[in-house]
Image: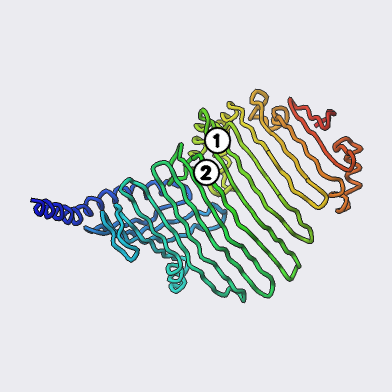
Amino acid sequence: MKKVIALSASAIAVASAFILPNFVGSAYQSQHQETIALLGQNPAISVKDYEFKREWFSATTKITFEIDTQIPEQEPFQFIVNEDITFGPIHISSEGTHFSLAKSIASFDIPVIADEETVNVLNEHISLSSSLSWLGNHSSNIATQAYQTEIAGKQLDIQPSHGHFVLNGDELEGDFTWQGMSLMGDSGHVKMAPVNMTFDQTLIAGDLYSGTALATGDFMMRFDEFSLLDNESGAQVDVAGVQISGHTSEDDNLLGVTLKYHADSIGSMGQQVTDANFDIAIRNLDIDTVMALNELNRTLPSDPNDPAFGQAMMQALPTAMKLLDYNPEIILENISVMTDAGLVATDAKFSIDKQLFDPRNPMSIAAAAKVNAKGSAPESFFAQFGLAPMIDGYVNQGFIQRNDGELSFNLEMTNGQLNVNGKPLPL
């Protein structure tokens, strides 16, 4: 009896392995077509041609995309993505045996690059694969190999990279690491050391593919070193420990965004500063209004000189005005840098009183604006650049306060009245 059950189970397993791929392929094709249709709604991407050829266990696709760079006077360019897809439930490869609904491997063709050898080199050095799990998770991997070549007498050295991305329903997370690059020659060099990026986002509105997505969560990008040297002019820039991070949150249908830019050190023209920071926060953005502006942006002409561009901006103004209903704020939380002379720092908060702003009269922004700002710096920092006379003039006019070698200011603006260091100043 046990032998019969075992044989039956084996027969079912074998039959499933042969029958299921056809059903999986049909479902995958429908989903693939829906995704491509959504990509075609993205204003920066046009799908010029789409082929999906499905067999029992596998399929191939050929998709021709045209990218609008949104740069005036620059023609859109096309590239072709070719996919080789295999259908589950079982995938057997050199990497082992895996269970998933589908797996694909992509290659590229770029018509603007007429040299077939160059395209082949790109495909040899770029690996892009993805899979669809039984739980509906999309997992993608991209990897590039090291590549060296010579460009205009300069040696280009591109180091390997690897990225892993997972889309699980409305949640998208991933990480990407690039070992960097260098361009070396007699005239100078450009170097960039390891780059790392991570993100963890949750879609809350819009669509990921059509360019209307709005998400909450975090992202971070860091590169350890960037160096630029031009021997002819003597210009040199060295930046270390650059980190860009962001956090987006939602509360009661209002969006909050915080962006932080940091560098451990920046050196140029014989000067060096450390611990450079630029932190900005935008709060109280109504999500429905932001989404409406996203939709309007999809139809906005890419050329600002196009008359239709100005018309579209005017049509968007009433929608943008709705943002003021929720008292949005722009906050410069920390702009600072440590110099040899000491800390230079400032912060500010900006908002607009909707009751005092008339969109038909742009000059009314002066009365509607609410501004609070303050800053401080050592006087010796400016003196080394020969700015002492200018500083004296600002101090005499009351724009800057001086106290034991430290300069500072405090600015407030409300109801059209500007006060600097507690003294009213006419606008």
Q: Quadrant of the C terminus?
A: top right
Residue 295 percent coordinates (x, y): 48, 39
Residue type beneath disc 1: Ala
Depth check, front residue: 210 or 179: 179
Residue at image mark 2: 300
Quarter of the image where one finds residue 420 = top right
Which residue is drawn at the image coordinates 32% and 45% (left, top)? 135
Which residue is drawn at the image coordinates 78% and 33% (left, top)? 411
Residue type beneath disc 2: Leu
Q: In the figure, is residue 186 to the left or right of 132?
A: right
Q: In the figure, is residue 227 to the left or right of 11?
A: right
Residue 240 percent coordinates (x, y): 67, 57
**Crowd around label 1: few <14 · some 14–19 · many ≥20 (10 Å):** some
Residue at image mark 1: 316
**Looking at the image, how many numbered discs can be counted on the residues?**
2
Q: Identify the secondary structure beneath mark 1.
A: helix
Depth check, front residue: 100 or 354: 100
